């Protein structure tokens, strides 16, 4: 895909997803140019691809963001596949040819966290795999009635107004006085501190070294991802924090979008091995103190035991997390859960998901 393909790509996406310019509140063309051409890891060989039926007639597209990963000690450029679209029957041939180009045997690493059931079947048919844990979203309820309203479909706007949430908040206050287990447990001596994004990056890189597959997160690429994420104002303000134990040692760190009184969207949570439960308890207690009603994030194998120990946590499948690679060792480690991915290494922060 070239920059001058962007108007044609917009038309294909609008045709495929039955959207038009009135349905979004941002400059689509500018955004996809920044997103799909602006990464420090970008090179035409690892970017998005289109099918040109002739005379610059783009009928199908696969949009991809390149991301640098460390896998079994080797650095590689993976591709986050964000959208696969074609212009109806006119784009069927192009879609088939683009699809064949995405076979696992041809790539170091492809992944997506928003695959539909049909797409997931296609990933498997072309040599890829579905990661079952990463395909789940966890939800922690701090204010149960407000959480129910916030988790209603996007079209249920009335239940999510400030007035409605304030009224539900009074009901939640009564419930919390009666049912003490709703408030997250406190870990003696543990505390939360606000941190800048560079502090999060440095702490996170140390804590994810234990995973065979993990993002490289160079200074340049990480902060580009941060700046792209911060444009998604519909999720709230992007913040980061660290979690310390009683001795002042940083045992965890989190990157999240926050809307007090509403939802905290945890993009990335990292911690020392064995401290998952302490970090989760302290983080949830902090969100409760900050008046959040609901907390959510992508499931990770290393967090599951700690999440199971939390009260009022549920899991929901929203989209399949799929991966494809020609590297058998990489595939084996990913299927064994020896992988850190999601958050900035996913599409959850993209305006194409929330605003399009």
Image (cartoon, grey):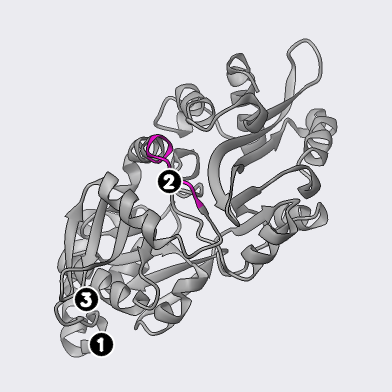
Mark 1: secondary structure: helix
Magenta segment includes 154: no
Q: How dense is the environment of label 3, judged by Cα within 10 Å: few (below 14), some, or many (20 and up)? A: many
Residue 159 visible to the viewer: no
Mark sitting earlier along the chain (3/2): 3
The relative height of residue 171 versus residue 59 in the rendered view (above or below) is below
At horizontal 62% and vertical 31% (from top left) the residue drawn is: 47
**Mark 1 or 2: the one toward you:** 2
Residue 287: which quarter of the image? bottom left
Q: How dense is the environment of label 2, judged by Cα within 10 Å: few (below 14), some, or many (20 and up)? A: many
Quarter holding the N terminus is top right
Q: Which residue is mark 3?
A: 172
Looking at this rendering, what residue extends furthest in the front direction?
A: 73
Task: Please report the bounds of the magenta region as a residue range.
Answer: 215-222
The relative height of residue 128 versus residue 278 in the rendered view (above or below) is above
Any mark on residue 181, and which? 1
C-alpha separation, residue under disc 1 versus residue under disc 3: 13 Å
* Horizontal side, residue 71 vs residue 220: left or right: right
Mark 3: secondary structure: helix
- Residue 11, horizontal then vertical, whole percent: 63, 24
At horizontal 68% and vertical 62% (from top left) the residue drawn is: 130
Magenta segment includes 218: yes
* Horizontal side, residue 43 vs residue 266: left or right: right
- Residue 122, horizontal then vertical, whole percent: 77, 53
Mark 2: secondary structure: loop
Q: Which residue is mark 2?
A: 349
107 and 143: which one is in front? 107
- Residue 179, horizontal then vertical, whole percent: 23, 89
- Residue 169, horizontal then vertical, whole percent: 19, 69
Q: How dense is the environment of label 1, judged by Cα within 10 Å: few (below 14), some, or many (20 and up)? A: few
């Amino acid at each position: 895909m070239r920059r001058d393909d962007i108007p044609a790509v917009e038309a294909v996406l609008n045709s495929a997803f039955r959207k038009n310019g009135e349905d979004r509140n941002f400059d689509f063309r500018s955004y996809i140019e920044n997103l799909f051409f602006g990464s420090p890891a970008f090179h035409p060989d690892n970017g998005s691809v289109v099918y040109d039926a002739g005379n610059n007639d783009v009928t199908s597209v696969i949009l991809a963001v390149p991301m640098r990963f460390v896998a079994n000690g080797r650095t590689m450029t993976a591709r986050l596949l964000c959208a696969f679209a074609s212009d109806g029957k006119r784009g069927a041939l192009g879609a088939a040819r683009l699809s064949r180009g995405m076979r696992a045997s041809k790539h170091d690493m492809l992944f997506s966290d928003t695959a539909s059931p049909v797409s997931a079947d296609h990933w498997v048919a072309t040599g890829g795999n579905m990661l079952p844990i990463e395909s789940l979203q966890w939800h922690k309820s701090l204010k149960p009635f407000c959480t129910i309203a916030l988790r209603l479909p996007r079209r249920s706007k009335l239940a999510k107004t400030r007035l409605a949430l304030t009224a539900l908040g009074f009901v939640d206050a009564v419930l919390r006085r009666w049912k003490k287990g709703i408030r997250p447990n406190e870990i003696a001596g543990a505390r939360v501190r606000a941190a800048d994004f560079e502090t999060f990056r440095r702490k996170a890189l140390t804590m994810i070294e234990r995973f065979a597959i993990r993002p490289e997160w160079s200074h340049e690429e990480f902060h580009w991802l941060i700046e792209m994420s911060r444009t998604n104002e519909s999720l709230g303000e992007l913040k980061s924090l660290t979690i310390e134990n009683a001795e002042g040692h940083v045992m965890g760190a989190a990157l999240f979008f926050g809307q007090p009184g509403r939802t905290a969207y945890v993009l990335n949570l990292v911690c020392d091995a064995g401290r998952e439960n302490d970090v989760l308890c302290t983080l949830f207690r902090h969100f409760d103190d900050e008046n959040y009603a609901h907390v959510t994030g992508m499931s990770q194998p290393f967090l599951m035991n700690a999440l199971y120990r939390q009260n009022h946590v549920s899991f929901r499948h929203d989209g399949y997390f799929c991966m494809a690679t020609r590297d058998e060792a990489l595939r084996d480690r990913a299927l064994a859960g020896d992988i850190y991915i999601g958050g900035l290494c996913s599409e959850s922060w993209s305006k194409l998901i929330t605003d399009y």
